[in-house]
């Protein structure tokens, strides 16, 4: 910068601050006490401005950022814990925010509307605008009271389910459990008689144990949700495996999201 515009800039700063920053004389120019007091803050400002470029570069590389992860609850919590630990170890600059009790269909809605970045859940169908990665594979099981007649079967034929009362979880037909129950009805030639909707898997198991009805569930629920007076049986014919997926919006440009999905 040439001397005249530099002098004008200094005078403007001094006018804004209401104080002289330099003593000017025929012998030269020196800082006033006010000018001396601003040297260290000015150096800090320069350092902060240099850090801005570094912050942007680290953000673009997925080293820092924020990711909101939703998941259903205890039945998939065993997948969330290791992922959170790995993110903390390998990408400590990423703030991973966890939101539990997100049913698969509701979690997917929140991903598509942008209120969640990622969700772990089970779906038989995903919309075209959603990408996903399989994290685990589970069995679809029948949960019945321990003293129920179906508990005597090792593999329960779907034709034995026609007259049974069903307890279900909230969800639309695209969600795994409602979809699989409808398919069982088609295979067994019956329309499922739903007697109660449970708010979560723990309550679902409690109601089955109380002999209020039977329910479809997952091996992940069997392994991780307490179920007193409940036994789990396979179905015949085999209804097919259930995939636990990590899902996110296709084309999401958040580098931190891509980093977490890769770690998963």
Image (cartoon, rainbow, N blue to C red):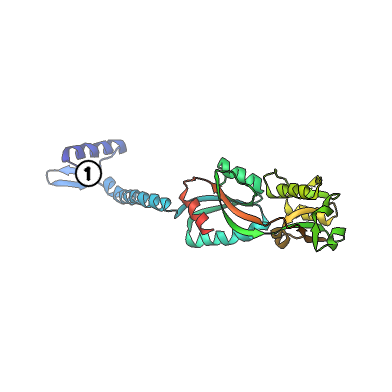
**Residue 261 rendering spot, x and y as whole percentages:** 52, 54
Q: Nearer the viewer, residue 241 or 122?
A: 241
| Residue carrying label 1 | 22
Residue drawn at x 70%, y 59% is: 139
Relative to 20, 105 lies left or right: right
Q: Quadrant of the C terminus?
A: bottom right
Relative to 145, 95 lies left or right: left
Vertical position of residue 93 compared to residue 175: above or below: below
**Residue 241 rendering spot, x and y as whole percentages:** 67, 57
Residue drawn at x 39%, y 49% is: 56
Badge 1 marks a residue whose secondary structure is strand
Label 1 crowding class (10 Å Cα cut-off): few <14, some 14-19, many 20+?
Answer: some
Q: Nearer the viewer, residue 63 or 50?
A: 63
**Residue 201 rendering spot, x and y as whole percentages:** 73, 53
Which quadrant of the figure has residue 209? bottom right
Which quadrant of the figure has residue 208? bottom right
**Residue 35 rendering spot, x and y as whole percentages:** 27, 46
């Amino acid at each position: 910068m040439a001397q005249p515009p530099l002098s004008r800039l200094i005078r403007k700063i001094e006018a804004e601050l209401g104080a002289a920053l330099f003593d000017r004389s025929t012998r030269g120019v020196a800082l006033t006490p006010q000018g001396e007091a601003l040297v260290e803050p000015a150096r800090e400002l320069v350092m902060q401005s240099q850090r801005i470029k570094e912050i942007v570069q680290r953000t673009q590389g997925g080293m820092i950022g924020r990711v909101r992860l939703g998941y259903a609850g205890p039945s998939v919590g065993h997948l969330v814990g290791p992922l959170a630990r790995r993110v903390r170890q390998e990408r400590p600059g990423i703030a991973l925010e966890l939101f539990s009790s997100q049913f698969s269909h509701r979690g997917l809605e929140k991903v598509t509307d942008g209120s969640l970045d990622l969700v772990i859940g089970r779906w038989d169908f995903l919309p075209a605008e959603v990408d996903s990665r399989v994290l685990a594979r589970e069995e679809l099981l029948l949960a019945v009271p321990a003293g129920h007649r179906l508990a005597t079967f090792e593999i329960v034929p779907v034709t034995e389910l026609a007259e049974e009362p069903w307890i279900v979880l909230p969800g639309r037909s695209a969600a795994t459990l409602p979809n699989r129950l409808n398919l069982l009805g088609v295979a067994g030639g019956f329309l499922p008689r739903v007697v109660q909707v449970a708010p979560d898997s723990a309550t679902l198991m409690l109601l089955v144990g109380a002999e209020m009805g039977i329910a479809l569930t997952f091996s992940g629920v069997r392994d991780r949700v307490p179920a007193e007076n409940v036994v789990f049986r396979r179905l015949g014919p085999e209804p097919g495996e259930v995939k636990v997926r990590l899902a996110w919006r296709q084309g999401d440009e958040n580098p931190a999201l891509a980093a977490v999905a890769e770690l998963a």
